[in-house]
Image (cartoon, coloured by chain):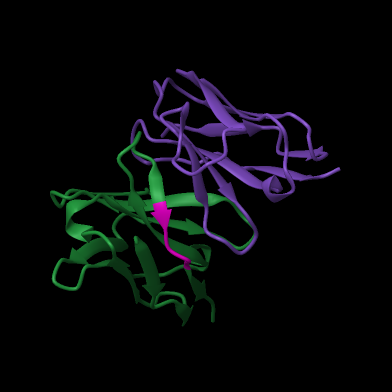
Chain colours: A purple, B green
Amino acid sequence: DIQMTQSPSSVSASVGDRVTITCRASQGISTWLAWYQQKPGKAPKLLIYAASSLQSGVPSRFSGSGSGTDFTLTISSLQPEDFATYYCQQANSFPFTFGPGTKVDIK
Amino acid sequence: EVQLVESGGGLIQPGGSLRLSCAASGFSVSNNYMNWVRQAPGKGLEWVSVIYSGGTTYYADSVKGRFTISRDSSKNTLYLQMNSLRAEDTAVYYCARRGDGGRSIDYWGQGTLVTVSS
């Protein structure tokens, strides 16, 4: 199975800050990577697919990059509604494993 | 509008069985790749199973041989039959549709809680 790691596990940031989250796959997954945002008690929401494609309706302050084993999610200017947990997921091969999550909270 | 509504969760004893349902609207379950994803209390997301439009199925190792994914096109509903349940199967179970982009999940249900405990 492909193992996914994320760093940091949590980050404290202020509104307006630039936040970068890293996701690493244990083997190459091309660009078969998605990023999701999850708020407490809610279902996850798709932000980025195919490593760098912005899902329709998602604000442009979210961006993704990377290929192979190393990927990043960047929030260019953190907004109050962005405080949440973020997960990456590989879709290269089954099982489609998720990363452990990165919690973004208020500094 | 795409909607996914799960049902069937509840409290079940270890070793028991439960069937989850996911009623879909706004699209055809049979023409899409449909997933189950779960989340244990306070933990991260775990992909559980997928059924392709052609009927091929895949499972996480943790549930293989115990869980079965299926669908009913006449009811536009996805199912997850869960047998030989264990305490570690306790989680919120989400029904989720794979979108057109990058094999990602573009729509999720609200989830249904399964608690396995004596």
Q: Is residue B110 magenta?
A: yes
Residue extent of the magenta highlight: B107-111
Vertically, is B117 above or below B54? below
Quarter of the image with the C terminus of chain A in it: top right
Vertically, is A77 above or below B80? above
B26 horizontally vs A10: left or right: left
Principal SS element in the magenta part? loop
What is the number of callouts on the image? 0
Q: Is residue A93 visible?
A: yes
A75 horizontally vs A35: left or right: right
**Residue occupying image coordinates x 15% and y 66%:** B73
Residue furthest right as drawn: A107
Q: Quadrant of residue A104?
A: top right
Q: Position of residue B60 (x, y in %)?
A: 37, 49
Q: Position of residue A84 (x, y in %)?
A: 67, 49
Q: Quadrant of residue A33?
A: top left
Q: Nearer the viewer, residue B20 or B75?
A: B75
Q: Nearer the viewer, residue A20 or B68?
A: A20
Q: Is residue B12 visible?
A: no
Q: Position of residue A7 (x, y in %)?
A: 67, 31
Quarter of the image with the N terminus of chain A in it: top left
**Residue occupying image coordinates x 33% and y 70%:** B83
Q: Is residue B15 magenta?
A: no
B97 horizontally vs B89: left or right: left
Q: Position of residue A71 (x, y in %)?
A: 54, 23
Vertically, is A72 above or below B107? above
**Residue occupying image coordinates x 40% and y 24%:** A29
A59 horizontally vs B26: left or right: right
